[in-house]
Amino acid sequence: MISPQAAVLDLGCGHCQFINNVRSEKRFGMDRNPDSVPKAGPGVCILSQSCSQPWAMADDSLDVIFTSNIFEHLHTKRHLRETLTEAWRCLRSGGRIIALGPNIRYLPGAYWDFWDRHLTELSLGEAMTETGFTLI
């Protein structure tokens, strides 16, 4: 799914398990966790920042943004909108965002009892559509 010529960002890269295994021309990770920097493999550039702040990346500079279990932890809907707006700005025409996360319909119960978990697949889809993305 990722071209060897692609520029890829792992949003909320944590310990870089995903981005370290991507074989592409340009690889970036973004996370506020200071452990991300020493965990990044050779050639991976880490942006140590909040994803809801302006990204230190040029417009139309990414082909793929990957994120796993991050969006449901953003503190406010404004933070989600700002993150998606930055993703939209940085993705090239034809670029895509691959977003993984829990689905409340298939994961009921105590997982959702924490204050930072407030997103469903429908509300995420709505936020993504509002910022320009087409869902597939």
Image (spheres, rainbow, N blue to C red):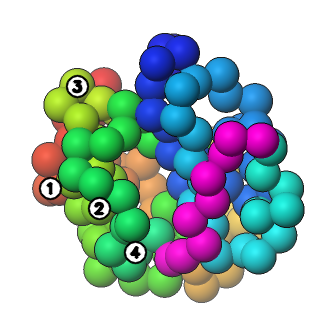
Mark 2–mark 4 Cα distance, whole angstroms, equals: 8 Å
* Residue drawn at the location 83% of the way across and 70% of the way down: 35
Mark 4–mark 1 Cα distance, whole angstroms, equals: 16 Å
Q: Nearer the viewer, mark 1 or mark 2?
A: 2
Q: Earlier in the sequence, mark 3 or mark 1?
A: 3
Q: Which mark is residue 55?
A: none
Q: Amino acid at mark 1?
A: Glu
Residue toward you, 120 or 71: 71
Q: Earlier in the sequence, mark 2 or mark 4?
A: 4
* Residue drawn at the location 63% of the way across and 59% of the way down: 46
Q: Amino acid at mark 2?
A: Glu
Q: Which residue is mark 3?
A: 94
Q: Earlier in the sequence, mark 1 or mark 2?
A: 2
> Whole-percent x and y of residue 70?
57, 61
Q: Amino acid at mark 4?
A: Ser
> Whole-percent x and y of residue 92?
24, 35
Report the span colored magenta: 42-50
Q: Which residue is mark 4?
A: 52
Question: SS of the residue at dot 1?
Answer: helix
Question: SS of the residue at dot 3?
Answer: strand
Q: Which residue is mark 2?
A: 86
Residue toward you, 5 or 67: 5
Mark 3–mark 4 Cα distance, whole angstroms, equals: 23 Å
Is label 2 in contact with label 4 (beta carbons under 8 Å)? yes
Side of 134 relative to 55 (left or right): left
Mark 1–mark 2 Cα distance, whole angstroms, equals: 13 Å
Q: Which residue is mark 1?
A: 130
Magenta segment: does it hold 46?
yes
Mark 3–mark 1 Cα distance, whole angstroms, equals: 17 Å
